[in-house]
Image (spheres, helix red, strand yellow):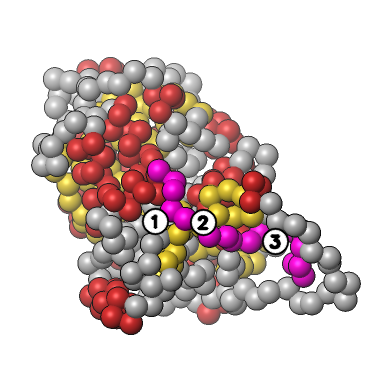
Amino acid sequence: MRLRRFASAFISSRLRCTRWTSHAKSSTRVQPVPLFEADSVLVRDFIYSALYDENQGYFSVRSSAVGELPTPINFNALEGHRAYTQYTDNLYDHGDSSWFTPVELFQPYYGYALAEFILRTHVFSNPLKIYEIGGGTGTCARNILDYMKAHAPRTIYDTMTYTSVEISGELAKKQYQKVVTGEDNRQQFRVERRNASDRSGWGAAKKESCFVIMLEVLDNLPHDLVYRETSRSPWMEKWVLERTDGEVPGLPVEISKPLQDDLIIRCLEAMKGDPVQSRSIFRTLKNTVVKLLNASELLWIPTGCLKLLETLYSARPNMTLIASDFSFLPDVKVAGEGAPLVSSKKGGVNKDHGTYLEAKGHADIFFPTDFSVLQKLDHHCSAANGYSKTSRRSSIVNSAQFMDLFAETGKTLTRDGYNPLLEDFSNTNFYISTPG
């Protein structure tokens, strides 16, 4: 699981988990039973249930997986890279947490950088309204509000609102307890426990300016899986079917159906018909070879991201979007282009799974973000909401560039000059989208 959060080129061998293999044959053969397609669900619905189901979803059962530092790290007191690595290794080895997000590890300076960006771009004549989707333990909200109280004009802080939209009940409680202490931030902060992709939760559309923050949210949004036999064949959509037949009782199976789901169709169209467009030269060459050889294709597409963006542009069309996530994930075992890492932690031991079908509450499912595709979806959703395709200004920058512009980088500098805020998490980017 640590592989999700730490992007250095040197990953400890003890963190590399073995490839999943099928269960050994049982001495008692289970008799097959008929498979009823009526019991099947789209891949995105299976993933949503595995992650967010109130009773058995990963973020309901394992809210402690989201790491929370007991105290901020004193980076200036660390000798260098090795000391930093030892410190973070100790956090994982002596706790139940599966990961620590950048905003948590680099607090308060990561959150301060976001606040500084907001202050530099906010029009002071407008009320400051911030929404954070999937706010984790509340560290980002707390740091931003603290920074605003200390550095923004008093009227900005006094009149601002910060709304956390959180699907997990346990994390919603943690956020409020961390952000609201006594009277601090009580007037500014509130938590709304709901699914941010559900349009009904946003109420009437509001064209006022606002900021929407999504840190490590895109990687946990449900995706769909599409397949075609050759580059000239029509796309098929994958469904998941629960079963009790065969030699692996209870393990679901994938089935293919003709492409018919509206959201999948809209996503493919928004991605310009070719879901595997990328800035990567290697991936471009690979796609060319696939087409020349007329080979089969298995692709993960970000339908959950599209649905969320459609909702946001319908509800808050003049938002400034601030999203940060992972552009690359190492050692992925699951099949398909853009496939997720599926990881679990038990007894302090991390396990990397070879299939998402094993994940039902005990394992995280997280995807890399193709930021060029994110940009296409963002502009597509803005245009679909009645705005021209040029009505949004957007940019993709790596996290080090963003932090170098807006963070107090001296606060995260170690004694030998190593700066984890700028040098760790090198596989993360920021996507900034503002009204034109």
Packing grade of label 1 (10 A; few <14, some 14-19, many >=20) is: many
- Side of 339 where 288 appears, left or right: left
N-term mark: 3 or 2: 3
Q: Residue furthest right?
A: 28
Element class at badge 3: loop
Residue 182 visible? The answer is yes
Amino acid carrying label 3: it is Leu
In the picture shown, does residue 175 fall above or below 343?
above
- Single out the mark in the foreground, 2 or 1: 2
In the picture shown, does residue 111 fall above or below 370?
above
**Circles 2, 1 touching at the beta carbon (< 8 Å):** no
**Circles 1, 3 touching at the beta carbon (< 8 Å):** no
| Cα–Cα gap, marks 3 and 2 | 20 Å
* Along the viewing direction, whichever of 17 and 160 lies nearer the viewer: 17
x%, y% of residue 272?
A: 24, 55
Element class at badge 2: strand
Packing grade of label 3 (10 A; few <14, some 14-19, many >=20) is: some
State the residue at coordinates (57%, 60%).
Answer: 255
State the residue at coordinates (43%, 53%).
Answer: 259
258 part of magenta stretch? yes
Give the magenta part as a residue range. Answer: 245-262
- Side of 233 where 317 appears, left or right: left
Quickly name the residue at label 2.
257
| Cα–Cα gap, marks 1 and 3 | 23 Å
Amino acid carrying label 1: it is Ile
Element class at badge 1: strand
* Res. 301 mark: 1
N-term mark: 2 or 1: 2
Chief secondary structure of the magenta portion: loop
In the picture shown, does residue 210 fall above or below 159?
below
Quickly name the residue at label 3.
251
Residue 108 visible? The answer is no
